[in-house]
Protein backbone atom coordinates (compact mmCIF):
# COMPACT_ATOMS: atom_id res chain seq x y z
CA UNK A 1 0.00 0.00 0.00
CA UNK A 2 1.17 3.49 -0.70
CA UNK A 3 0.07 6.59 1.09
CA UNK A 4 -1.83 9.29 -0.71
CA UNK A 5 -0.01 12.60 -0.45
CA UNK A 6 -2.52 14.75 1.42
CA UNK A 7 -0.29 17.81 1.10
CA UNK A 8 -1.24 17.97 -2.59
CA UNK A 9 -4.96 17.75 -1.88
CA UNK A 10 -6.42 21.23 -1.71
CA UNK A 11 -9.11 21.94 0.83
CA UNK A 12 -11.72 24.62 0.31
CA UNK A 13 -9.88 27.91 0.85
CA UNK A 14 -12.75 29.60 2.65
CA UNK A 15 -14.77 28.55 5.64
CA UNK A 16 -18.26 27.58 4.64
CA UNK A 17 -20.95 29.77 6.14
CA UNK A 18 -22.74 28.45 9.17
CA UNK A 19 -25.50 29.97 11.26
CA UNK A 20 -24.81 30.17 14.96
CA UNK A 21 -28.51 30.18 15.78
CA UNK A 22 -30.11 26.92 16.80
CA UNK A 23 -33.12 27.71 14.63
CA UNK A 24 -33.13 26.35 11.08
CA UNK A 25 -32.09 28.86 8.44
CA UNK A 26 -34.78 30.33 6.24
CA UNK A 27 -34.65 30.19 2.46
CA UNK A 28 -34.02 33.95 2.50
CA UNK A 29 -31.05 33.57 4.87
CA UNK A 30 -29.58 30.80 2.75
CA UNK A 31 -30.09 32.66 -0.54
CA UNK A 32 -27.98 35.66 0.52
CA UNK A 33 -24.90 33.65 1.49
CA UNK A 34 -22.01 34.72 -0.74
CA UNK A 35 -19.21 32.56 -2.06
CA UNK A 36 -16.54 32.74 -4.73
CA UNK A 37 -15.18 29.99 -6.91
CA UNK A 38 -12.55 27.90 -5.18
CA UNK A 39 -9.12 27.96 -6.78
CA UNK A 40 -8.84 25.97 -10.00
CA UNK A 41 -6.17 23.81 -8.34
CA UNK A 42 -8.97 21.72 -6.93
CA UNK A 43 -10.13 20.90 -10.45
CA UNK A 44 -6.71 19.66 -11.50
CA UNK A 45 -6.46 17.56 -8.34
CA UNK A 46 -9.65 15.72 -9.24
CA UNK A 47 -8.98 15.31 -12.95
CA UNK A 48 -9.71 11.87 -14.33
CA UNK A 49 -6.15 10.47 -14.53
CA UNK A 50 -5.25 11.59 -10.99
CA UNK A 51 -8.60 10.45 -9.58
CA UNK A 52 -8.12 6.92 -10.92
CA UNK A 53 -4.91 6.59 -8.91
CA UNK A 54 -6.40 8.15 -5.78
CA UNK A 55 -9.52 6.00 -5.85
CA UNK A 56 -7.48 2.82 -6.35
CA UNK A 57 -5.27 3.66 -3.36
CA UNK A 58 -8.25 4.66 -1.24
CA UNK A 59 -10.06 1.44 -2.18
CA UNK A 60 -7.04 -0.65 -1.20
CA UNK A 61 -6.71 1.17 2.13
CA UNK A 62 -10.41 0.73 2.87
CA UNK A 63 -10.34 -2.98 2.03
CA UNK A 64 -7.38 -3.56 4.35
CA UNK A 65 -8.97 -1.42 7.07
CA UNK A 66 -12.25 -3.34 6.78
CA UNK A 67 -10.38 -6.63 7.09
CA UNK A 68 -8.58 -5.41 10.21
CA UNK A 69 -11.65 -4.04 11.99
CA UNK A 70 -13.48 -7.34 11.49
CA UNK A 71 -10.86 -9.05 13.66
CA UNK A 72 -10.95 -9.24 17.43
CA UNK A 73 -7.98 -7.93 19.36
CA UNK A 74 -6.45 -11.42 19.86
CA UNK A 75 -6.94 -12.22 16.17
CA UNK A 76 -5.30 -8.97 15.08
CA UNK A 77 -2.42 -9.51 17.49
CA UNK A 78 -1.82 -12.90 15.84
CA UNK A 79 -1.87 -11.29 12.38
CA UNK A 80 0.57 -8.57 13.43
CA UNK A 81 2.84 -11.07 15.17
CA UNK A 82 2.96 -13.15 11.98
CA UNK A 83 3.58 -10.09 9.80
CA UNK A 84 6.42 -8.88 11.98
CA UNK A 85 8.10 -12.28 11.88
CA UNK A 86 8.36 -12.24 8.07
CA UNK A 87 10.88 -9.79 6.59
CA UNK A 88 8.84 -8.74 3.54
CA UNK A 89 5.58 -8.61 5.48
CA UNK A 90 7.15 -6.55 8.29
CA UNK A 91 8.00 -3.82 5.77
CA UNK A 92 4.37 -3.79 4.61
CA UNK A 93 3.16 -3.54 8.20
CA UNK A 94 5.10 -0.31 8.70
CA UNK A 95 3.74 1.10 5.42
CA UNK A 96 0.14 0.46 6.48
CA UNK A 97 0.20 2.85 9.44
CA UNK A 98 0.96 6.07 7.52
CA UNK A 99 -1.17 4.87 4.60
CA UNK A 100 -4.21 4.62 6.89
CA UNK A 101 -3.43 8.00 8.46
CA UNK A 102 -3.10 9.67 5.05
CA UNK A 103 -6.23 7.96 3.72
CA UNK A 104 -8.21 9.22 6.71
CA UNK A 105 -6.88 12.76 6.14
CA UNK A 106 -7.81 12.52 2.46
CA UNK A 107 -11.32 11.34 3.35
CA UNK A 108 -11.74 14.38 5.59
CA UNK A 109 -10.66 16.58 2.65
CA UNK A 110 -13.08 14.79 0.31
CA UNK A 111 -15.83 15.35 2.88
CA UNK A 112 -14.93 19.07 2.96
CA UNK A 113 -15.21 19.27 -0.83
CA UNK A 114 -18.56 17.43 -0.80
CA UNK A 115 -19.86 19.64 2.01
CA UNK A 116 -18.79 22.79 0.14
CA UNK A 117 -20.52 21.59 -3.03
CA UNK A 118 -23.67 20.68 -1.09
CA UNK A 119 -23.76 24.07 0.65
CA UNK A 120 -23.24 25.93 -2.62
CA UNK A 121 -26.04 23.98 -4.29
CA UNK A 122 -28.37 24.81 -1.41
CA UNK A 123 -27.50 28.50 -1.65
CA UNK A 124 -27.94 28.57 -5.43
CA UNK A 125 -31.23 26.65 -5.20
CA UNK A 126 -32.53 29.04 -2.55
CA UNK A 127 -31.56 32.04 -4.69
CA UNK A 128 -33.34 30.55 -7.72
CA UNK A 129 -36.38 29.78 -5.59
CA UNK A 130 -36.63 33.44 -4.54
CA UNK A 131 -36.31 34.85 -8.06
CA UNK A 132 -39.43 36.45 -9.48
CA UNK A 133 -41.25 34.14 -11.91
CA UNK A 134 -40.36 36.34 -14.89
CA UNK A 135 -36.64 35.82 -14.20
CA UNK A 136 -36.96 32.03 -14.41
CA UNK A 137 -36.50 30.31 -17.78
Image (cartoon, helix red, strand yellow):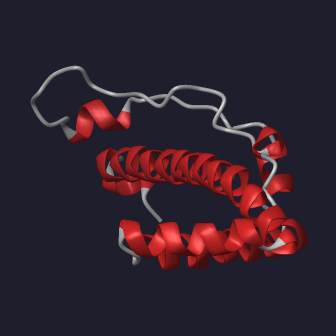
* Residue 96 rendering spot, x and y as whole percentages: 70, 60
Where is the N terminus found, in terms of image quarters?
Answer: bottom right
In the displayed structure image, the side of residue 68 where residue 109 appears, left or right = right
The foreground one among 113 and 93 is: 93
The foreground one among 25 and 57 is: 57
Q: Is residue 102 above or below residue 136?
A: above
Q: Is residue 87 above or below residue 135?
A: below
Query: What residue is drawn where x is 78% and y is 65%?
Result: 90
Work out whether residue 32 can be spotted.
yes
Q: Quadrant of residue 89?
A: bottom right
Query: What residue is drawn where x is 48% and y is 70%?
Result: 76
Q: Is residue 6 above or below residue 50?
A: above
* Residue 110 rendering spot, x and y as whole percentages: 59, 53
Q: Quadrant of residue 93?
A: bottom right
Q: Is residue 113 above or below residue 82?
A: above
Which residue, as the protein is rendered here, is positioned at the far left?
Answer: 23
The foreground one among 42 and 35 is: 42
* Residue 104 rendering spot, x and y as whole percentages: 58, 52
In the displayed structure image, the side of residue 81 where residue 134 appears, left or right = left
Q: Quadrant of residue 64?
A: bottom right
In the displayed structure image, the side of residue 90 where residue 65 appears, left or right = left
Query: What residue is drawn where x is 18% and y is 37%?
Result: 26
Query: What residue is drawn where x is 72% and y is 65%?
Result: 84
Work out whether residue 48 can be spotted.
no
Amino acid sequence: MTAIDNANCPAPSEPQPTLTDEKPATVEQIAVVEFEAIDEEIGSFFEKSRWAELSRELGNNLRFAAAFVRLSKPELIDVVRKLLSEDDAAENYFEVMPAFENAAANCRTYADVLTAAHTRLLVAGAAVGLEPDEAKP
